[in-house]
Image: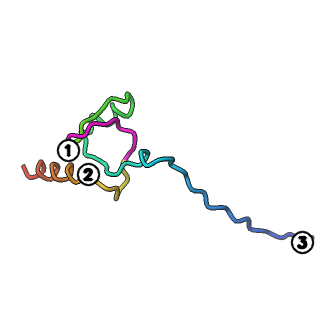
Amino acid sequence: MSTSTQTIERPEIREDLGNDQDVPKFFHYVKKDQIVDSAVSGKMVVALCGETFPVTKQAKPGSPVCPDCERVYRGLRKK
């Protein structure tokens, strides 16, 4: 009895994110204690740059950071 194995190619699947509003242009610095509260309750947070928004996405390493938030953060760390 002879058996053979075939390889079935898996098609490339891309997630359609719909519109550009699903993907933030920049990620912002926000106080840690506000992040979880906002993610659970939907409350607005205030970033170091002053922008307000509900937390809906988590930044991954290498994600683009808001230049204004970065500037304020670096100023805070020098103290």
Q: x and y percent of residue 9 in the render?
A: 70, 65
Q: Residue at x 20, y 44 (%)?
A: 49
SS at badge 1: loop
Q: Is residue 77 left or right of residue 65?
A: left
Q: Amino acid at mark 2?
A: Cys
Q: Amino acid at mark 1?
A: Cys
Tell me the residue that label 3 is attached to: 2
Decide: few, some or many residues near mark 3? Use Cα within 10 Å; few <14, some 14-19, many ≥20: few
Is the residue 34 above or below the residue 48 in the image? above
Q: Are marks 1 and 3 in contact (CB under 8 Å)?
A: no
Q: CA distance from mark 3 to mark 2?
A: 62 Å
Decide: few, some or many residues near mark 2? Use Cα within 10 Å; few <14, some 14-19, many ≥20: some
Residue closer to the observer: 49 or 32: 49
- Identify the image quadrant of residue 54: top left
Disc with the residue nearer the chain's start (2 vs 1) = 1
Q: Is residue 48 left or right of residue 17?
A: left
SS at badge 3: loop
Question: From which residue to which does the magenta span run?
Answer: 48-58
Tell me the residue that label 2 is attached to: 66
- Identify the image quadrant of residue 37: top left
Q: How is the image coloured?
A: rainbow
